Image (tube, grey):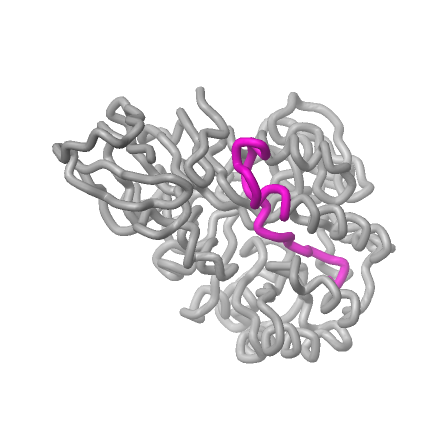
């Protein structure tokens, strides 16, 4: 058994001092700091904050690798890289590609998920919780950086055959057969359905939510903007209290002036994501995303025609940006990248917050969200 001492614990609703966390693969106890124990391996937090591990439910890649096209070693490299950002579990996110290619990637990722959920010391990276399927069932009018030639109507048989792996899927409800698939998935599987890359309006959005959609993919991006006579998907998402909204809080995809508005509207339904691509963690230059060339310059990732194409955001930076540009407390900002995404994809019984009985996914940070140590199920997978 191990014990984290000399730190301030970031709970889901407050900071806790003068306490320590006793854990092995799960959190066993949270006890007073002056409790005397001789059966523990003590880990000194050195006065830092002890926060729950972060969860990225929407990330395409980083450090030169891509969830859609990389091999198993590339996926492992990404799992190790995101751990340096405090991410202890995530959903590799696949883009619009032919179903045959996606199926091959899914088969590989299913095996890697099993491997990642085994011995954390042997895996030495963030746990794979499943996959996020963003495309190819999207609107050509709002395709963003997805290749139009691969966009197709929903294929229910394909999705259902991988329903055990797909934790989250983006669907444009206006496509033929989309609403039937949404209803079938939400009624018969644990797959959560998001709407995104869509041209639907306000009423159609409400209809999709009533049919079982629980999330909106990267709010504001790849959808019609809000208007006072036509609130659109954005208006429906901000006012519908039971719907989660993803936010790319890099200050480029979304102006930082809107962070407070979204936080006020969504509260515990705000989910920070990176939407990162393979250029994340690498120098400026030209990179591939979904079969198209993307130019990275600073935090800007653009196709040749100026279309925004993913990001190079890291999840701890997203938390810092939200914390900096809103009046959210640190526990509230951290929850947007830990507890809320866990709840959004239905893994909050064991992930997302520091509570007895949950996995010992823990990070040591400072108030600038620098990562000093990342532990997945009690094992250190990154240390500065």
Q: Quadrant of the C terminus?
A: top left
Q: Indicate the quadrant where residue 135 lies.
A: bottom right
- Classify residue 303 as left or right of residue 353: right
Residue 321 visible in the shown view = no
x then y, percent, for residue 233:
56, 67
Residue situated in front as seen by the camera: 116 or 262: 116
Q: Position of residue 198 (x, y in %)?
A: 67, 64
Q: Residue furthest front?
A: 39
Q: Is residue 178 found left or right of 47 in the rendered image?
A: right
Q: Nearer the viewer, residue 227 or 144?
A: 144
Question: Which stretch did the figure color magenta?
Answer: 114-138
> Residue at left 82%, top 55%?
148
* 51 horizontally vs 122: left or right: left
| Towards the viewer: 324 or 382 | 382
Which percent across, then down, holds residue 95? 73, 50
**Residue drawn at (58%, 67%) of the image:** 190
Residue visible at 55% across and 55% down? Answer: 220
Counting from the top left corner in percent of width and height, residue 296 is at 67, 29
């Amino acid at each position: 058994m191990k014990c984290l001492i000399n730190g301030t614990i970031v709970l889901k609703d407050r900071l806790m001092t003068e306490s320590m966390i006793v854990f092995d693969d799960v959190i066993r106890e949270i006890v007073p700091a002056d409790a005397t124990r001789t059966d523990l391996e003590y880990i000194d937090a050195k006065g830092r904050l002890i926060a729950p591990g972060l969860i990225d439910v929407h990330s395409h890649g980083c450090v030169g690798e891509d969830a859609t096209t990389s091999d198993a070693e590339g996926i492992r490299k990404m799992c190790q890289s995101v751990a340096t950002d405090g991410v202890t579990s995530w959903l590799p996110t696949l883009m619009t590609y032919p179903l045959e290619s996606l199926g091959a990637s899914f088969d590989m990722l299913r095996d890697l998920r099993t491997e990642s959920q085994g011995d954390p010391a042997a895996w030495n990276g963030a746990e794979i919780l499943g996959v996020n399927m963003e495309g190819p069932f999207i609107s050509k009018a709002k395709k963003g950086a997805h290749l139009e030639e691969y966009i197709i109507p929903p294929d229910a048989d394909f999705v259902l055959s991988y329903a055990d792996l797909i934790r989250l899927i983006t669907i444009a409800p206006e496509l033929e057969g989309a609403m039937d698939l949404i209803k079938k998935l939400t009624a018969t599987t644990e797959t959560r359905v998001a709407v995104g890359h869509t041209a639907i309006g306000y009423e159609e959005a409400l209809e999709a939510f009533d049919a079982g959609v629980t999330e909106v993919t990267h709010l504001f991006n790849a959808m019609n903007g809000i208007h006072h006579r036509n609130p659109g998907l954005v208006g429906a998402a901000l006012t519908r209290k039971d719907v989660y909204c993803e936010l790319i809080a890099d200050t480029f995809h979304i102006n930082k002036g809107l962070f407070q508005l979204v936080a006020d509207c969504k509260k515990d339904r705000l989910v920070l994501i990176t939407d990162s691509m393979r250029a994340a963690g690498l120098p400026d230059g030209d990179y591939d995303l979904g079969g198209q060339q993307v130019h990275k310059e600073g935090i800007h990732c653009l196709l040749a025609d100026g279309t925004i194409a993913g990001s190079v955001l890291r999840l701890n930076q997203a938390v810092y940006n939200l914390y900096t540009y809103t009046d959210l407390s640190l526990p509230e900002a951290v929850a947007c990248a830990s507890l809320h995404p866990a709840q959004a994809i239905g893994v909050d019984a064991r992930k997302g917050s520091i509570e007895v009985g949950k996995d010992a996914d823990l990070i040591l940070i400072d108030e600038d969200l620098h990562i000093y140590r990342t532990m997945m199920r009690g094992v250190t997978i990154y240390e500065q």
